[in-house]
Amino acid sequence: MIKHTKKQMLMLAAIASIGLSASSAFAQAKDVVVDGKGEVPYVIDARNVVARSGTGLCWRTGYWSPAAASTAMAGQFPAGCECDGDIVPKEKCTPAVASAPAAAPAPGPKPTADKIKLSADALFDFDKAVLKPEGKAKLDDLAAKSKSVKLEVILAVGHTDRLGSDSYNQKLSERRAAAVKTYLVSKGVEANRVYTEGKGEKQPVTGTKCDTVKNRKALIECLQPDRRVEVEVIGSK
C-alpha cells in the first residue's frame, strides 16, 4: 500500500513538473499581434493575438504556408519571425540599418551647347532630301568640331517650307534630318549620339515675308530659308 502511494506521488510530481515547464515556456513566449489583413496563416483570438500551444508553438490554420508566414505582418516584421523563425528568411526579421546618406557627387564640367543653324540653300533643294555639296562641306566642319569636345548628343531637326500638305511636309522634314544623321555617321560620329526629329512646316523662319509673292517659282525661291535642318551639338570641354 505504501509503495503504491509513493508511486502515485512520483507520477503526480512528474505531471506537475511538466505543467510548470509548459506554463513557464508559454509565459516567456512573446505575444504576436497580427495586422489582421488578408488570410492569416495562424489562429488568432479577438485581440488578433496568435494562439499558442502549451509549449508556446503557434497554431497554424489551413492557410499556412512558408510564403504566408513570411508575408502576414505582425507590426514591423512578419508573424512567422516569432512563430516559424527557422522558415522565414532572417533578413525579413532583422531591423533595417539606416545607412548614412551618400555624399553628393562633385559637380562635373558644365555642358556647353554650340548651336549651329545650317544655311538652308546649302542643304536642300525644293522637295528634296538629298544633301548638296555645300551642305556636306558644312557638316564636315560640324563633325570636326564635335571631335574637339566631349560629345553628349547631336540634335538634327528638319524643316520644310509651307508648300504641300502637312503630312507630306512632315515626312519630308524627317527625311532631311535623317540625311544629315547618315552623313555625320559616315564622318565618324557615333550613331547613338545623333537624334533626329522632323517639324514639317510648323516653324518657318521667313514669317510673312513671302505672303505677297504670287509667282510659284518666285515663291519657292523666297521660301528657301525654310527648307533647312538645324543642328545642335551638346557636349563639354
Image (tube, rainbow, N blue to C red):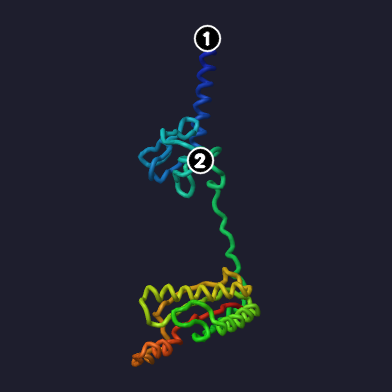
Amino acid type of the residue that numbered disc 1 sits on in the rendered structure: His
* Outermost residue, right side: 148
Q: In this orientation, which residue lies closer to the viewer: 223 or 28?
A: 223
User: What percent of the width, then of the height, locates residue 93?
Assistant: 53, 46
Sequence-wise, the earlier of marks 1 and 2 is: 1
Count the marks: how many? 2
Q: In this orientation, which residue lies closer to the viewer: 96 or 164?
A: 164
The label shown at residue 82 is 2
Amino acid type of the residue that numbered disc 2 sits on in the rendered structure: Glu
* Outermost residue, top side: 1
Vertical relation: 37 (above or below) 53: below
**Is label 2 in a helix, a strand or a loop?**
helix
Vertical relation: 82 (above or below) 168: above
**Which picture quadrant has residue 194?**
bottom right
User: What percent of the width, then of the height, locates residue 153?
Assistant: 56, 74
Question: Around disc 2, counting alpha carbons within 10 Å, would you say few (fewer than 14), some (14 to 19), or many (20 or more)?
Answer: some
Is disc 1 in contact with disc 2, using a CB cutoff of under 8 Å?
no
Label 1 vs label 2: CA separation?
A: 44 Å
Vertical relation: 145 (above or below) 81: below
**Which picture quadrant has residue 144?**
bottom right
Q: In this orientation, which residue lies closer to the viewer: 16 or 128?
A: 128
User: What percent of the width, then of the height, locates residue 5?
Assistant: 51, 11
Residue visible at 51% across and 14% down?
8
Q: What residue is disc 1 on?
A: 4
Q: From the viewer's perspective, is 44 left or right of 113?
A: left
User: What percent of the width, then of the height, locates residue 10?
Assistant: 54, 17
Vertical relation: 36 (above or below) 121: above
Q: Name the mark nearer the viewer: 1 or 2.
A: 2
Image quadrant for the C terminus? bottom right
Residue visible at 49% across and 33% down?
57
Residue visible at 55% across and 48% down?
94
